[in-house]
Amino acid sequence: MTDKKQTNKRNRNNQDDDYNPKFRKIRKKLCPLCADKNFELDYKNSEQIKKFINEKGKILPRRATGACAKHQRVITTAVKRARHIAIIPYTQD
């Protein structure tokens, strides 16, 4: 092996010498609906629904809301129901 390959191999094993903030461990978000057992999402409450949509009226993805898959489906259904009965607009101009 060349000296460069041996150096790289040593650096990978010794993490103190090779700290890279790009690969830091990111803490997972807790699902807001799982965290609070008493919290129930209601499509008739526009203040609750607005937490899960952006300024243009689009539904925020799971990585932004921190919701689990089960509750993201509940959020999507609630937003769509609220849009259908005109509690929240489909789009913001």
Image (cartoon, rainbow, N blue to C red):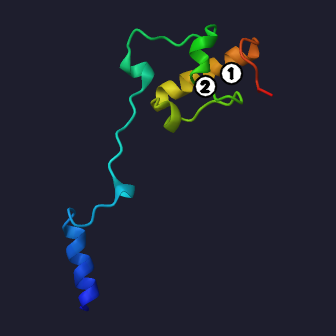
Residue 19 sits above or below residue 31 on the image? below
Q: Residues within 10 Å of mark 1 (few under 14, many from 20)?
A: some
Task: Give the image quarter of residue 55.
Answer: top right
Q: Residue at x 32, y 48 (%)?
A: 25
User: Type of residue at label 1?
Assistant: Lys
Q: Position of residue 35 (x, y in %)?
A: 37, 20
Element type at marker 1? helix
Numbered tag placed on residue 76 in the rendering: 2
Q: Quadrant of the C terminus?
A: top right
Residue behind mark 1: 80
Given residues 78 and 87, the one toward you in this image is: 87
Given residues 17 and 4, the one toward you in this image is: 17
User: Type of residue at label 2?
Assistant: Thr
Q: Residue at x 68, y 21 (%)?
A: 80
Element type at marker 2? helix
Q: Position of residue 54 (x, y in %)?
A: 64, 29
Q: Quadrant of the N terminus?
A: bottom left
Residue 63 sits above or below residue 72 on the image? below
Q: Are marks 2 and 1 in contact (CB under 8 Å)?
A: yes
Relative to 38, 44 lies left or right: right
- The CA distance from mark 2 to mark 1 is 6 Å
Residue 17 sits above or below residue 88 on the image? below
Relative to 67, 83 lies left or right: right
Task: Give the image quarter of residue 14.
Answer: bottom left
Q: Residue at x 36, y 44 (%)?
A: 26
Q: Position of residue 62 (x, y in %)?
A: 51, 35
